[in-house]
Image (cartoon, rainbow, N blue to C red):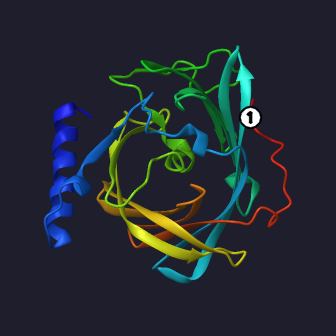
Amino acid sequence: MKASSLFIKILYVTLTVLFFSGKPQVAAAQTDTIRMGDKRFNTSSLKPGLRQYLVYFQSSKKPKSLVFWLWLRNTQIQTKNGQKVFVTTQNWYGSDTTSYRTVYSINRLKDFAPVYHSETVAGKKRSYNWSASKITGADSVVQNTVKDFSLDFAAPNFNWNLDIETFEMLPLAAGKIFAINFYDAGYGKPQYTIYKVIGSEVISTLDNQQVDCWKLFTESEHNGAHYTETFWISKKGHEFLKEEDSFGGGYRYKVKLPGAAVNIVNRFAEK
């Protein structure tokens, strides 16, 4: 996205916040652009370990049925090529083997900059080498369907497939607005997305804990449909606990499961 387009989008969001607040706001509506190496971006908030999420979809056309997924996301700190990195593996389990997918991502420890990303969906592997200036297909990976892919970047960006982990590192506070340059590897181009802290709420977790959370919100348009996404992130532990999405007459929910809810070990991460 061009700088002028980003400015217009940020200005629109800022004016919207001012209009609906009912009274003048000054510092509360300031937008923070999250950049690589930004000291406000707290990588120490991302705790290593396995996270489990129940994900389910509901359509207004079929209100009596649900589509379920179980997502396992395991983040570890490792050393690769002499550099400390976050290694995040994802395993998505659906109702049959065709819906199963795996994701394997490497990010620098100091700023969460993407280094490598690979995903296998419907048996097809897409693997990329990722830097601040470009992304290319990893030609050394066997059966990589995107080995000839290449895209230059105008600016460093974050891996959209790790949005949950990224949100846990944001300096959330009342009235904050963030602009994050996300990219979904292999699709389109990087684009800034605006996220607003729209308040806080105490929610009940599945293990009967009462947790005070920040509510982070974004909205967008895709193929003529209006999307809204709301995320609940704990104030104390920076944990991503819940998400509610609305789009095209459908709804999606993500709920973090207690640590012992499912006894599945993440053994099948892509290397």
Q: Position of residue 102 (x, y in %)?
A: 69, 43
Q: Position of residue 185 (x, y in %)?
A: 50, 34
Q: Position of residue 238 (x, y in %)?
A: 56, 55
In this rendering, the answer to whether 83 lies above or below 242 is above
Count of numbered badges drawn on the protein: 1
Q: Is 6 positioned to the left or the right of 139 in the image?
A: left
Q: Is residue 7 visible?
A: yes
Q: Front-most of 108 and 266?
A: 108
Q: Quadrant of the C terminus?
A: top right
In the image, what residue occupies the spot 76% across and 54% down?
Answer: 97
Quarter of the figure with residue 162 = top right
Q: Quadrant of the N terminus?
A: top left
The residue that disc 1 covers is 270
Quarter of the figure with residue 38 = top left
Q: Is 11 positioned to the left or the right of 174 in the image?
A: left
Secondary structure of the residue carrying tag 1 is loop
Q: Is 8 positioned to the left or the right of 237 in the image?
A: left
What amino acid type is highlighted by mark number 1? Glu
Q: Position of residue 217 (x, y in %)?
A: 38, 61
In the image, what residue occupies the spot 74% across and 28% down?
Answer: 78
